[in-house]
Image (tube, helix red, strand yellow):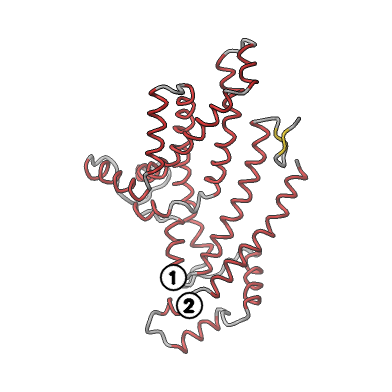
Amino acid sequence: MGTYIVQRLVWLPIILLIISFITFALGRFGPGDPVEILMGQYADEQVVERVREQRGLNDNIFVQYGRYLNNVAHGDFGESFKYRGRTVSELLRNKMWVSAQLNIAALLLSVSIGIPLGLFAASKQGTSWDIGTVAMTLLGQSIPIFLTAPVLLIVFALKLDILPTHGWGGFFDTRIILPAVAMGVPGIAIITRLTRAATLEVISQDYVRTARAKGLPESIVQRRHILRNALIPVVTMLGFSVAGLFFTSFIVERFFGIPGMGSLFIEAIFARDFPIINAVIIIVTTMFVMINLIVDLIYPLLDPRIRLGGAYAS
């Protein structure tokens, strides 16, 4: 296991170098000069040139990239173009935690409802309960967030007046309920369908029939032989969801006025604030690699036949 982990981690800096250079190059050669956007349409050319020189934007791209890597290695992602006098690390720190809390709440909601609902649908295969559950999940998965969010606001905030409409007060504040539900509904639908499909596949396996033929209690069969194996595709999907904790809620953050990571990233794109864009890409890439490694380490715990590297034990 130690060798496998080291092999995976060795690839992390290589992946980061490739992705960060592509992002860095697109920022330098892509349309839109961040300094001109910062100064506005009436910017003085001499002032623009002086700012570019101060920030080292006139240097060769490899010189700029080398300087950027050296700063990142020391934990310095640079200074924001849009928010003058504020470092990227300062801007990201609090906003990442806000987005993480929102995504964790949505993820907990999706898992706590989706997995039991998927198991229930699989146990009622072919009945009206199963058909109704599948139809409901298809509906929940097909409705986009930008439609779900306004409906929730209209019903629970404007009509019933039982929940606040916008703002942020932390994980245990009532203002997290509506955005978490808006983000959690598609997750519930996806997890329910994955759990149902995986459970139906596992139920038909020989080892499940053998366990029942040996007279094992149904609760043990469900927990030890069915649930553990059915959770493998769900864990895979959850790995991608956890990796995007700081990044995937920008639509909901816009609707509910939440000062999170998504809103900052969208503003950075429109303002060509490349230090923020580069930092977010590096952080998200690192999280994807690390979370996928953790997911791979969980697989053998769920199914002892799995060996690290993707092979099954004979």
Q: Residue at x 34, y 45 (%)?
A: 148
Few, some or many C-alpha atoms within 10 Å of disc 1 (few <14, some 14-19, many ≥20)?
A: some
Q: Residue at x 30, y 48 (%)?
A: 150
Q: Position of residue 194 (x, y in %)?
A: 51, 35
Q: Could you tell me which quadrant the N terminus lies in?
A: top right
Q: Is residue 288 left or right of residue 162?
A: right
Mark 2 falls on what kind of element? loop
Q: CA distance from mark 1 to mark 2?
A: 9 Å
Q: Residue at x 35, y 51 (%)?
A: 146
Q: Could you tell me which quadrant the C terminus lies in?
A: top right
Q: Is residue 12 left or right of residue 133?
A: right
- Disc 1 target residue: 271
- Disc 2 target residue: 33
Few, some or many C-alpha atoms within 10 Å of disc 2 (few <14, some 14-19, many ≥20)?
A: some
Q: Residue at x 55, y 65 (%)?
A: 278
Query: Exactly how many numbered labels are in the figure?
Result: 2
Q: Amino acid at mark 1?
A: Ala
Q: Position of residue 41 (x, y in %)?
A: 38, 81
Q: Amino acid at mark 2?
A: Asp
Q: Is residue 171 left or right of residue 59?
A: left
Q: Nearer the viewer, residue 223 or 39?
A: 223
Instruction: Tell me if residue 195 comes above or below residue 100 in the rendering.
Output: above
Give the residue at the far right of this rendering: 3
Give the residue at the far bottom of this rendering: 46
Q: Going from the N terminus, do you reach mark 1 or mark 2 first? A: 2
Q: Quadrant of residue 62?
A: bottom right
Q: Nearer the viewer, residue 291 or 168?
A: 291
Q: Position of residue 258 (x, y in %)?
A: 38, 53
Q: Say if mark 1 contacts mark 2, CB within 8 Å.
A: no
